[in-house]
Image: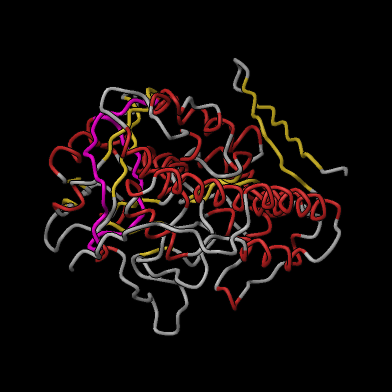
Amino acid sequence: MADAPMPQQVALPAQVLSLEELKERKERLIRDATMGIGNLQQMIVDSIGWLPDEQLCQSIARHVALDVPRAKTVLKKLRLIEKGICTMLINASDTGSLTPLEALDVNPLRLVTLDCLKSSRWPDPLGCGPSVAIAWGLMRLNAQPGRTLGQVANFSPDWLWHANQSFLPLSLRTMLISNWRIVHLHPVPTIPDALVSFPCFIALPDTLATRLVETGRLLVSDFPCQQANSFLSVAHSLSKLLMWIDQIPSIKALRDENLMIIGVNHAVGRLPVVLKNADGTGGLKHWHNQSYCGFATVLEPPQDEAEIVLTPEEIGTLVLLDTQTTLRELTDGLHWDMVHSGQHSIHRHIALPSKLSFLLGAGRTAGPGASLQSTLASQRNALSRNSIGSSEVTIVDDAGSRLRVTTTINKID
């Protein structure tokens, strides 16, 4: 596929709201949603209408180097709108009244899982992608191997997290992302049309991540279904790794290694718009965008092979980050968030707040700490709409007697 010509300039549409206007409107809508004033569905529609032009966003994501100040302006607007919608959803008194916005191809309850707000062109992989696509381009333009993300000019490490960080489990929010070290990176001033404009992320232990970056190959013979997944969100990739540690012997054996984050712009061919079923049920075959789990690509090895093989173009976009945190530390923190604190639920592709987990029907899944979570999952299904969460602890004394203590946290006002 031939590369699209680089635009000569990047101009904002004439009638785009300023940052100050967006901030004022966002705060007003958050206040109204929290107090139950107005129609929440219409508030979401209005907010989506404030998004910068899609073609502009895609052009900026592919050619960040063309106009860095304008890229930062558009990114700040995207983040502001995303955060506004996320905050409305988590605080709104009548979230249960929301229905899918069919005209915009958007389910409001899914917006919180995406790290992006897209409408008509999803699931088209040539869409502009999430705001993190622009943030990633700014990072890659200014980063140098050996430095940390906090040392990158024209970039904020927090741009790689959800716009509303309250949606993250506490263990992820407390990770010092500014201290993540850049291990490997190629300058990529322009993303060719053969690749999607946004990065996808995979979390792996050091040994496997380094091999993938050096060879472009990942052995998946002991992975479930002999497949791997990459995600539009760093946080989602960490949730998936939590599953893999319990499921995959080659990863579990390396749980004392440092946790690495790999970013890559995939070939467009990896994200075909092919339905799982002719009637559309179940979403897309290789591009999980039709459920509350957000966006996850399905990475499969070539026929009769046991390794996923990246294309030379994909390899050229690889970035490797060292979180300077071990896999064991990640699992300890996420297990506490998911099991003991009761503030988040986990699906195989995502961790999300318990309130929205209830609304979305996203229960906990077998995998990380399954024996600890099974009882909590059944409790979660029985929670009332005003319940924020529950927690359970089993105490075992020296004689083997067990005492189970369960608490439920209810919303008062």
- Toward the top, the furthest residue is 398
The quadrant holding residue 105 is bottom right
Where does the magenta region start and end? 180-206
Residue at (63% x, 18% y) in the render: 397
Percent of width and height locating residue 71: 44, 48
* Residue 238 visible in the picture: yes
Side of 69 relative to 364 (left or right) = left
Give above or below for 149 relative to 241.
above
Residue at (74% x, 44% y) in the render: 388
Side of 32 relative to 263 (left or right) = right
Percent of width and height locating residue 158: 50, 35
* Residue 379 visible in the picture: no
Percent of width and height locating residue 177: 45, 28
Residue at (54% x, 52% y) in the render: 78
Report the number of discs.
Answer: 0
Percent of width and height locating residue 255: 34, 28
- Which quadrant does the N terminus fall into? bottom left
Q: Nearer the viewer, residue 315 or 113?
A: 315
Give above or below for 197 relative to 207.
below
- Which quadrant does the C terminus fall into? top right
Give above or below for 19 relative to 320.
below
The quadrant holding residue 203 is top left
Side of 325 relative to 268 (left or right) = right
Q: Nearer the viewer, residue 60 or 96?
A: 60
Residue at (25% x, 27% y) in the render: 145
Q: Is residue 193 magenta?
A: yes
Q: Nearer the viewer, residue 98 or 85?
A: 85
Image coloring type: secondary structure
Q: Is residue 237 magenta?
A: no
